[in-house]
Image (cartoon, helix red, strand yellow):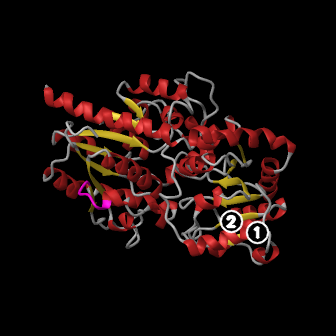
């Protein structure tokens, strides 16, 4: 950073989900390495989950963690501080608790020299707080530009023409480029289950978008230029990419003992023969659907690693408790079922892995395409995963598993058929061929650092221009 430029103090306040906390952490580290002071604000457990800071930041006074105790609200399990600790129907209580952080956060901002606040969709009250304190606010949306375009401008998010779930199952008329990106009915209905009825997610995002100074998105024009052009016209305020923020092996948590288990198993398999299966820390499948997924993997006849997270599911059972009886014995040697945290990026990077059966979370897609892995798409029941699945399907870098559009059910046959088509069938050759060169965009660190530099320059220049008035 130019030493003649003023060093800014930037507060970062993500929503309480790991898929939000990590991208905020990546941007925060970059800004600190440019010489700006960072106050990264979250709850104690979420801060403890983050990887260690790089040595240069550890030895500086540029990066500070600010821990805010999460207030308890009725209905929220004790000690829960993130979405990954909750079944989907409990997430609205987490949002109510998050809103109660307004008072301690305001107190912190009042007693600091913060210049900018980078915030998330859920803290709809924060842009106005920042404005009252004379601070600039940036809405950092961790999803891609196509998803943002689908949701539209603040007026649509805050009560526009789409009033019923069915309204979200069609491409909106403001999308001015060819697109098939829309929700399936079961996806939008399930997504509403994790909303706070008092302030639904669309309302939160709309108010945040309306009141912020600028909008930043985790994507880049090289992937979907039309979406960026449309967003700028829809929002009528600065729209900036920060790139895809691809993780590196150095950035991820390390557990060499666990990795050796996977490496030994993977080293025994043929190149690009293994399917890696992980449906996210926050995806909820019923016992019936967990069984269909298991039987589909078994019927595919292909080697796989299936990471089953221990989190509460719909019936109150933990994920690892509802694997079919004797399933692991039947697939022994060909399939590895792992009931713990797994080093996902290291597994995907192994030459034996050819495809990724994923819940279509944007972070997971970025990791997979950064390594050229073809996708088998089983969209989750919350957030934008259905929209990501449609986008990847249309880009022909993956194939969606066929599901009932009304209730989201699927069969083991559809799982097996999709896996075999993507991994070994001649019909899937185009998908495999298209996924491999995606590395040039998704894993291009120089490209994404360029956009982070441009964002840094934006907040520096906006601060300078404000001070000169």
Majority secondary structure of magenta residues: loop
Pointers 2 and 1 in contact (CB under 8 A)? Answer: yes
Question: Can you identify the residue that label 2 sits on?
Answer: 306
- Residue 223 in picture, x, y percent from top left: 57, 33
Label disc, if present, on residue 275 of the rendered structure: none
Q: CA distance from mark 2 to mark 1?
A: 8 Å
Circle 2: element type: strand
* In magenta segment, residue 59: yes
Q: Residue at label 1?
A: 335
Q: Earlier in the sequence, mark 2 or mark 1?
A: 2
* Quadrant in the picture for the N terminus: top left
Secondary structure beneath dot 1 equals strand
> Can residue 300 be seen?
yes
Q: Is residue 205 left or right of residue 350?
A: left
Q: Is residue 6 left or right of residue 357?
A: left
Figure check: 35 above or below 73: above
Seen from the viewer's position, the closer of residues 116 and 1 is 1
Q: Is residue 397 visible?
A: no
The range drawn in magenta is 58-62
Residue situated in front as seen by the camera: 438 or 140: 438
Q: Which residue is at 74% across, 47% downward? A: 402
The image position of residue 198, as x and y in percent, is 36, 50
Residue beneath the point at 47% across and 57% down = 251
Residue 150 x/y as whole percent: 52, 33
| Quadrant of the image occupied by residue 288 | bottom right
The residue that appears at 49% across and 63% down in the rendered structure is: 84
Q: Is residue 381 above or below residue 261?
A: above
């Amino acid at each position: 950073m130019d030493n003649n430029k003023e060093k800014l103090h930037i507060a970062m306040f993500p929503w309480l989900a790991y898929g939000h906390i990590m991208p905020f952490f990546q941007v925060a580290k970059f800004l600190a390495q440019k010489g700006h002071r960072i106050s990264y604000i979250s709850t104690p457990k979420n801060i403890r989950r983050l990887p260690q800071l790089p040595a240069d930041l550890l030895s500086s006074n540029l990066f500070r963690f600010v821990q805010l105790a999460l207030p308890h609200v009725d209905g929220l399990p004790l000690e829960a501080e993130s979405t990954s600790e909750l079944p989907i129907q409990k997430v609205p209580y987490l949002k109510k608790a998050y809103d109660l952080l307004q008072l301690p956060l305001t107190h912190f901002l009042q007693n600091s020299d913060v210049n900018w606040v980078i915030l998330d969709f859920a803290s709809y009250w924060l842009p106005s707080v920042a404005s009252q304190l004379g601070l600039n606010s940036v809405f950092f949306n961790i999803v891609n530009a196509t998803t943002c375009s689908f949701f539209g401008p603040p007026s649509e998010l805050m009560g526009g023409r789409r009033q019923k779930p069915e309204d979200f199952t069609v491409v909106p008329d403001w999308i001015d480029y060819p697109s098939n990106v829309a929700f399936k009915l079961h996806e939008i209905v399930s997504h509403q289950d994790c909303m706070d009825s008092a302030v639904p997610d669309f309302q939160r995002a709309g108010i945040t978008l309306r009141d912020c100074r600028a909008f930043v998105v985790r994507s880049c024009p090289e992937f979907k230029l039309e979406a960026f052009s449309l967003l700028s016209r829809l929002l009528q305020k600065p729209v900036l990419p920060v790139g895809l923020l691809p993780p590196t092996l150095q950035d991820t948590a390390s557990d060499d003992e666990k990795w050796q288990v996977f490496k030994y198993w993977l080293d025994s398999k043929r190149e690009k023969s293994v399917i890696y299966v992980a449906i996210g820390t926050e995806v909820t499948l019923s016992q019936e659907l967990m069984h269909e997924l298991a039987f589909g993997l078994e019927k595919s006849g292909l080697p796989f690693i299936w990471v089953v997270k221990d989190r509460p599911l719909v019936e109150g059972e933990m994920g690892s408790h509802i694997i079919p009886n004797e399933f692991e014995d039947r697939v022994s040697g060909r399939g590895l079922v792992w009931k713990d945290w797994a080093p996902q990026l290291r597994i995907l990077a192994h030459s034996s892995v050819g495809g990724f059966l994923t819940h279509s979370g944007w972070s997971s897609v970025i990791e997979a395409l950064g390594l050229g892995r073809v996708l088998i798409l089983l969209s989750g029941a919350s957030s934008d995963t259905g929209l990501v699945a449609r986008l990847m399907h249309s880009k022909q870098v993956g194939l969606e598993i066929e599901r009932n559009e009304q209730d989201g059910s699927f069969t083991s046959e559809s799982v097996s058929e999709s896996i075999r088509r993507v991994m070994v069938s001649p019909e899937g050759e185009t998908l495999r061929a298209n996924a491999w060169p995606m590395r040039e965009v998704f894993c291009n660190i120089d490209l994404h650092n360029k956009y982070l530099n441009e964002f840094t320059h934006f907040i520096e220049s906006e601060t300078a221009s404000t001070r000169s008035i």
